[in-house]
Image: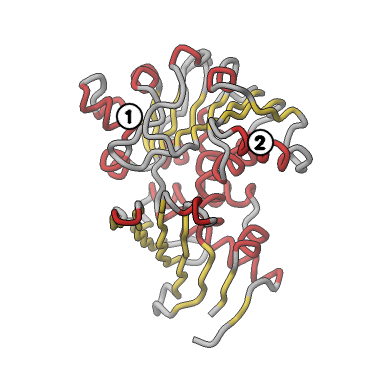
Amino acid sequence: MLILNADDVRRCLPMSECIAAMKQAFGLLGEGRAVVPLRAQLPVAPHSGITLVMPAFVDGGEGPDALTVKVVSVFDNNPSKGLARIQAVVLVLEPRTAEPLALLEGATLTGIRTAAVSGAATDLMSRTESRVLGVLGAGVQSRSHIEAVCCVRPIEAVRVYSPRAESVARLVSELSSREGLPDDIQGVASSGEAIRGADIVCCTTTSSTPVFDDADLAEGTHINAVGSYQRDVAEVPAATVVRARVVVDDYESAWEEAGDLLQPLEAGVIDRDHVVAELAELVGGSCIGRTSDEQITLFKSVGLAVEDAMAARVTLANAAVLGVGQRVEW
């Protein structure tokens, strides 16, 4: 069995390749060539955590098939113990025999693939001339989303806000000299400063309540919202959801888990038809991401196991070429 640690995964899963893989993943999903059951959720209340189990099988078409199981946990008390809030591992199985092939550090893979899905959605939904990116949050997903959006749009300025000023300063310092990113990356003092005048907004927080004021959004803004994955959690104001063209990663998962949509639905301000498409429909060309330059668009993602399967496929292919990873007897 091959074991890949976080550095290995980071080396073997470049963002641009992952964005292409996510488009392929949703294309295969739209063709009915992926089996992706709803993830199992295991609350671990005594330790303020939740563990999710996410299996997937992908009929790879012209490429190899993929069979994976990810176990990902979110434990809110981990940072106080010097540990990452998200812990994850991806088990890759031989799709014809179920023989264990590889074990991948999953938090890094999740961080990259989640942003890559948003990158794919941004490419299909945002205005092509988008230049300014506003980011709410300053953690792993914020970092990855900046990279992903800059892969698909000619971003010239990035504005980052989090109530944790030290996290913002650390993120800005880390990204200030990274190749492929704009020179103008700044932390700001409020969410309003981050999103006013932004062409694209990424919500990447752990907040249970909306993180910006709808009135601060400019016409034509595209929003990626990835932080909420439970019914009682919402990053996006209901007023924004109401006036946005909404696309989700998956209808079933969104209407089961996405508080950003479920709360307005339960309040009676939207119905289920308010979601116009799944990402697979945009990838396949049966629906378009926006209908005018003035339209506000919203991509709501809760995460699907097909993303892990295809990201793992890319990672292992590159690991084989680069000779990366540690082999152990099984």
Instruction: Please rate how many residues cluster around mark 2, counting C-alpha atoms within 10 Å: few if below 14, some from 14 to 19, many from 20.
Output: many
Q: What x and y, as percent, mark residue 186?
A: 69, 28
Side of 40 where 98 appears, left or right:
right
Q: Tell me where residue 276 sits by quadrant.
A: top left
Give the distance between the C-alpha atoms of the residues marked 2 and 1, in whole angstroms.
26 Å
> Of the residues shown, which amino acid type is indicated by label 2?
Cys
In this rendering, the count of numbered labels is 2
Q: What x and y, as percent, mark residue 162?
A: 55, 31
Q: Nearer the viewer, mark 2 or mark 1?
A: 2
Q: Residue furthest bottom?
A: 329
The residue sitting at 50% across, 76% down in the picture is: 101
Do tag 2 and tag 1 residues touch (Cβ < 8 Å)?
no
Please state which of residues 158 and 300 is positioned toward the viewer in this rendering.
Answer: 158
Dot 1: element: strand
Please state which of residues 317 and 196 is positioned toward the viewer in this rendering.
Answer: 196
Please state which of residues 64 and 127 is positioned toward the viewer in this rendering.
Answer: 127
Q: Is residue 15 above or below residue 196?
A: below
Q: What x and y, as percent, mark residue 188?
A: 63, 24
Q: Indicate how the structure is coloured in the image.
A: secondary structure
The residue sitting at 47% across, 40% down in the picture is: 283
Q: What x and y, as percent, mark residue 98?
A: 39, 77
Say which label, 2 or 1, has the lower sequence index: 2
> Of the residues shown, which amino acid type is indicated by label 1?
Val
Marking on residue 296: none
Can residue 110 be seen by looking at this rendering? yes
Q: Tell me where residue 251 sits by quadrant.
A: top left
Dot 2: element: helix
Please state which of residues 314 and 235 is positioned toward the viewer in this rendering.
Answer: 235
The residue at which mark 2 appears reads as: 150
Q: Is residue 57 above or below residue 211?
A: below
The residue at which mark 1 appears reads as: 275
